[in-house]
Amino acid sequence: MNKNIKRTVATMMIAGMTVSGAAGVYAGTNMEKINAFLNHSIGFKINGSTYIPKDENGNKLAPITYHDTTYLPVRALSNALNTPIQYDSKTNTIYIGTSTTDQWVLTNYTAAQLDEIKKAFAGFDGFETAYAPQMMIKGDALLKAAATADGVNLLFKNMTVNVSPRDYSHDYDGTTVILSNGATAKWYTQGKTSMLSVKVDDRYVTVSSPNGKLSKSQLEKAAVSVTKVGAIQTDLVKVSYTAAQLDELKKAFAGFDGFETAYAPQMMVNGDVLQKTVATADGVNIVFENMTVNVSPRDYSHDYEGTTVTLSNGAKAKWYKIGDTLMLTVKVDDRYVTLSSPNANLTQARLEKVAVTVTKVGAAQTDLATVTYTAAQTKAIKEEYAKFDGFTAAYAPTKMAKDDAFQKVASGDSVIFWFKHMNVQISPRDYSFGYDSTNVTLPNGVKAKWFTPSDTAMLTFQIDDRYVTISSADNSLTKAQIEQIATGVAKLK
């Protein structure tokens, strides 16, 4: 269904909720009694398929006709259109799609919860590794982890996540969907509860919301975040490369034709330390005290049998062994990254955590300055955003080159920040659409694209519900600097 049709139907759905919710209730001061008709003659087709709206108990629902306008049953259609519907009783507001109540947060398991999760998985021979969702709707909470006869149930306030070697959807008719990470999943119904099943590595994950608080689209987002439980966050610290270390990194990569851009991990296990960077015949070794990170155009795992895993950022990686040393290889942009711990001090889970942080080395920190907006500039920025219906939250760049300066903000079909050396456009539109482009990963792990509409290279990426496009009209900024600046675009306080 295209966006315009979906928006029109969504508008009708709001009206449908208002009418159906008001019938027979007069306590509220804004309620008005009406005489309407249930219209049983109207049928539904969604994307060409017949659809029969039903309530939570499976009873058939009919549209309401009132003053020549048809009002549709909102809750039933929300699932059919895969559009979350929420009602905030505090503000008496209905939210369709993303809302202030639909905020995703990291699960941030406590040490005790991690122990409980790992113990629940530990009893399964060949299946000991713990998996759990990394994201949940704000306000949800893990209640307990319980081992079953052939899996583990992670019980949250508003959802249940089952991890098992069995595909429970196998004996049920259902609907196949593609999740946002490209994985194929299946929706089916067990009793009155919708269940989503997807294969993650060597096991099946089934996600549901027994209390009906989460929509299908929300459950699909939670399913995408289910991954191996690795090192807890406190095990990792940011790698702070010195200027000398950055120079050594860049020189090591500079000798490779077509492969000059330096890549390096942004995180390391607490207590580790970078020792040296060494160029080899076909790659670069970044040698730490407890790990070695090799970046090369070659896939060293190709000739070895191994085990495929999915990293926390959705990338496919492969574990294999050379001699007595375990090696993890993952493709990052146009090169292969191989991580190992020759002294065996780092676990596989920790190496996987570090692997997802390997990215392009951007401008050195000393090349960039913080953008400080005056009160007047902040007010002007917010006023430009206020002109966009449904797009009022203000976002702005917080990093710039040291000799740059913010000049003005303007709007048209986007909000444009004019600096001396760069332009930053924030828009509901993806301006790269229709152009040849090159995919890159920013230093903060966000996927972005370079494209060139004329003679100016432009970088675009999505942040929340909008697209950010950054360019340097006078070509005074390098791509590495622009990519580093991109990581600083954030909501304006």
Image: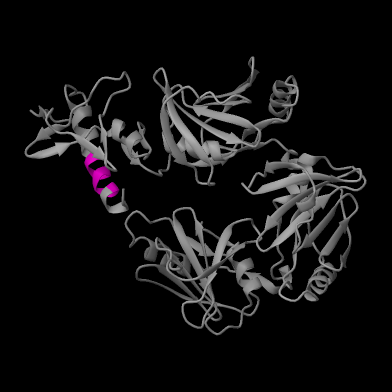
Residue 313 is left or right of residue 352, and the answer is left
Residue 168 in the image: above or below residue 396: above
Q: Position of residue 213 (x, y in %)?
A: 42, 28
- Observer-nearest residue: 133 or 105? 133
Q: Position of residue 9 (x, y in %)?
A: 25, 44
Q: Mainly helix, strand or loop, the magenta region?
A: helix
- Observer-nearest residue: 489 or 373? 489
Residue 107 in the image: above or below residue 455: above
Colour scheme of the picture: one colour
Magenta stretch: residue 11 in it? yes
Residue 208 in the image: above or below residue 91: above
Q: Quadrant of residue 204?
A: top right
Residue 137 seen in this snapshot: no
Q: Position of residue 406 (x, y in %)?
A: 53, 75
Residue 477 is left or right of residue 29, and the answer is right
Residue 220 is left or right of residue 478, and the answer is left
Q: Quadrant of residue 90?
A: top left
Q: Which residues are magenta?
A: 6-14
Residue 476 seen in this snapshot: yes
Magenta stretch: residue 256 in it? no
Q: Which residue extends farthest top?
A: 149
Which residue is drawn at the image coordinates 42% and 43% (left, top)?
100
